[in-house]
Amino acid sequence: MAGVGKAVPEFEDLLPVMAEKLGGEGLMRELSNGFQLLMDKEKGVITVESLKRNAAVLGLQDLRHDELVSMVEEGDTDGDGALSEMEFCVLMFRLSPGLMEESQLLLEEILQEELKSAAFC
Ligand SMILES: [Ca+2]
């Protein structure tokens, strides 16, 4: 998978393994933990600044500022300049081509769960 998902190379190999080990719900929990680690505690979303502050936690401290910016831009589907938890999870899946290919069913299961829980918001 050369040249794919350069922004966060560590996740490419981890996600499919984690998905296999943890199942859909467990993986979602791990992604949620990752989100908590990276988010701006006051705003409850991931911003470029919060990414920069917390990237070292996930071993991403070597990412340049413009890479962090493009990571946020890439995942920011509603265009508010920050990543919500859902946007973050979707981005992680998109950055993990292996997971996308191998775990379509898993992803569907997760999205269905998300839709269910989103209905309560
Ligand atoms: Ca957003």
Image (cartoon, rainbow, N blue to C red):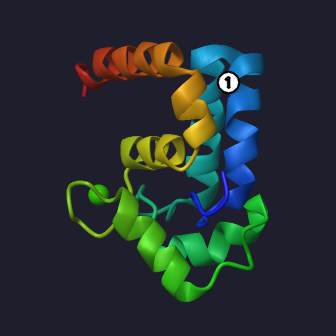
Residue 39 in the image: state x and y as whole percent: 52, 59
What amino acid is labelled 1 in the image? Answer: Ala
Q: Is mark 1 within 8 Å of ligand 1?
A: no
Identify the residue at image location x=56%, y=21%. Answer: 103
Give the side of residue 53 with respect to residue 46, left or right: right
Which corner quadrant holds the C terminus? top left
Give the side of residue 79 with respect to residue 81, left or right: left
SS class, disc 1: helix
Which image quadrant shows ligand 1? bottom left
Q: Nearer the viewer, residue 6 or 108?
A: 6
Residue with the most extreme bottom position: 65
Residue 85 against residue 54 in the figure, above or below = above
Q: Quadrant of residue 118?
A: top left
Identify the residue at image location x=68%, y=37%. Answer: 15
Residue 77 against residue 120 in the figure, above or below = below
Q: Which residue is mark 1?
A: 19
Residue 34 in the image: state x and y as whole percent: 63, 47
Give the side of residue 117 with respect to residue 119, left or right: right
Identify the residue at image location x=46%, y=20%. Answer: 110
Residue 47 seen anywhere in this rendered image of the structure: no
Residue 9 against residue 56 in the figure, above or below = above
Residue 111 in the image: state x and y as whole percent: 38, 22
Residue 98 seen anywhere in this rendered image of the structure: yes
Neighbourhood count class around disc 1 (C-alpha, 10 Å): few under 14, some 14–19, many 20 upward: many
Residue 60 in the image: state x and y as whole percent: 72, 68
Identify the residue at image location x=66%, y=34%. Answer: 30
Q: Total of numbered circles in the picture?
A: 1
